[in-house]
Structures are given as structure tokens and as C-alpha cells.
Image: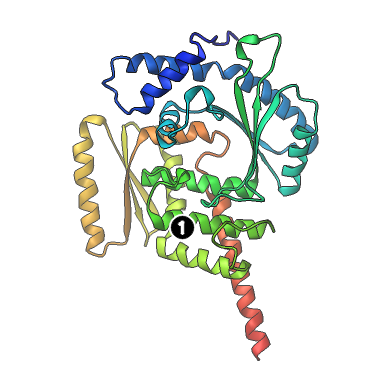
Amino acid sequence: MAWMKPRFSKKKVSKAGSILKAEDNTHPEYEWAIDVLTNWRSIHGYPINTFQSTLRDKLYKIDRDALVAQRLKRSPSVISKLQRFDSMQLHRMNDIAGIRAVVKNLTKVRELEKSYKNGRLKHELVSEKDYIENPKDTGYRGIHLVYRYKNDKAPDYDGLHVELQIRTRLQHAWATAVETMGTFLNQALKSSEGPDEWLSFFALAGSAIAHLEESSPVPGYESLDKIATFKQVLQACDTLDVENRLDAFSVAAESIHKDHQAGNYHLITLDLEEKLVYINSYGRRKLGEANEEYAKIERDIANGKPFQVVLVAAGPIESLRKAYPNYFLDTHEFLKQIKRMRRSVEKDASKKKQADV
């Protein structure tokens, strides 16, 4: 395989990043900046391939059933990150090349982490974040290790960064649910953008899953014990109709994929009463027609019809498929944990009732 070689100096990469950060696609050098970004992102393919080989070797001894996924950060995500953080520079962004290991449990996470940190890697560990011991406010949990690539035999790629993420299956189930709901709400929930009720729900759910794994709760929820956390998650689930929505979205996305439904847009309608999902697909020229039907169904909902409806562009579904190739829109594991919480709450209530007799 012929690997992409760097075509621009880091100084030019930095300049391109500044142009893209400005959010002005009329800039005379905007297309040049996009070209630079494309090349800069592409050259990370070589080091990430090296890391994948090493990761699989390590997992063979630790967890043979682990999921492995690698990705080069999508251009819109790179540009968005440049714009969100004032001090961010393109040539210093350390997660353009990302590789993820999803292992069975926390014990396996720590084994893999230890194997990397105590091993004889020639690459330099430049950053480590333990979001399990110290979860993010969003509810995100996992281990992030960033390495600076070193290879005397391939000097073109020296100094590039690769980010390794290590998660448990439950942590990954949470992240997949966030990605899925964010896609269908057309909001970057994982970047703390979107409706407050959904951001709060996923922060709370992250803390609940931390309790299931007997690890540190999410900041802001430390005062809640396990059962109290589960109760709040279930209340939010009922209010937001989380289970029906996630289940329907997974069915809809899989249907779009399997049936190869043509169209740039998909109008997805969930009949809550009949538990059925209807998908109507529209080409780009029929977007007006799609919006008219969308508005009609919303009027039906306002008049009491037991429906939920969303109009989704085909692009985000494909993007999500690329980001989660091994676990595409599968929210079943997350929903399974919600059911587990329900059983725990019911069992606790039963115990208290018996104690009062």
C-alpha cells in the first residue's frame, strides 16, 4: 500500500488551521487550507496502522473478544474543534488519528493500560487522561493515552500523534447511545451541544453506569447513591421516552442500511402504540416535500396522535457508521443496562416493603 506523504510544512499546516478556524469559506485561500487539512489528516494513516497492529497483539493476551476500531477524524469535526477552542492549532491537535479498544470490563481496561505504560514502546507517551477515575461532566468515561510517533525508518511520520482510547463495553454502550441520539437530534451531544434535558440525561446515565461498574460517579452526582441514581435515570427515561426512541432509531438506521433506500433524506416516523417504524426517503430535489410531510405529522402529534417523527439527512448516518464500524447504532446494550437498573430499583423497593411488614 502506498502511504500518503506530507506535502506541507508544519508552519503551513498551522496557517491552514487559522484560516479554517475563521469560519470564512470566502477566504481566498480557503480551498488551499482544505487541501492542507486533507493531506495532514491522511498522513496519520501510517502511524495509526502501526498502532493497530501493536494493539491487536496486546489484546490477544488480554481480551481476545475485544472490539478494535480506528479512524481518522472527519474534516468537519477537525474544523469544529478548531473553532471551539481558541488556543487550538491544527498541527498540535492530538486526536486526528484515533484508535479504540473496547474490552470486557474495568479489570481488562487496567491490564491493557498497564501493558502500554509499562511496555517497551519506542513511541513517547505525551498525555494521559483517566476519565474513569475522573469522569467528564458529560458522563463520558474511558482512558485516553496520546503518543508521539517515532520511527527512524519512516522519518516522514515522526512526531505525529496517535490517541488510544480504552473503554469497557458498558462505557462504549453509553458513548454509542450518545452518538445515536445526537445524530437523530442533529446535535453534537458528545461535545456538550444540544438540549439541556438530553445533556443532563446522559450525564446522569454515565453516573449510573459508573455505579454498575463500582467506580467513581460523574461530577455533580456524587451525593446520589446507586439506587437514587437509577431512579433518576428511569424518571428521565420515561419523560424523554428514551427507550422507544433509541430502539426505533436503531431499527430505522439498520433498515436504511439493509434495504439501501435511495434518498438524501429519511423521514422516520415511530408509531408508539403499534410499535412500528415507518421510513420515507426523499431525494435532494424533494426536500420541500419531505418538510411538508414532516410538518403534517407534527400537526398530527399535536392533535394527539401517538407518533414521534424526525427528518434525518443520509450523511450523518454514514458518518456515524464510519466512526462506529463495529457497533453501528447498536443501542441494545445501553437499553439492556436501563432494564438492569429497573430490576435493581424494583428489588430495592421489594426489600423495603418486606422490612416494613
The residue to which callout 1 is attached is 200
Q: Position of residue 271 (x, y in %)?
A: 35, 56
> Who's the residue at 50% across and 48% down the image?
177
Color scheme of the displayed model: rainbow
Image check: 91 left or right of 47? Answer: left
Seen from the viewer's position, the closer of residues 14 and 336 is 14
Secondary structure under badge 1?
helix
Image check: 354 left or right of 247? Answer: right
> Who's the residue at 58% across and 58% down the image?
207
Q: Residues within 10 Å of mark 1 (few under 14, many from 20)?
A: some
Seen from the viewer's position, the closer of residues 184 and 32 is 32
Q: Quadrant of residue 111?
A: top right
Q: Quadrant of residue 158?
A: top right
Using the image, determine if residue 102 lies above or below residue 343.
above
Q: Is residue 63 visible?
A: no
Using the image, determine if residue 141 lies above or below residue 49.
below
Type of amino acid at the residue the image marks with label 1: Ser
> Who's the residue at 42% across and 45% down the image?
182
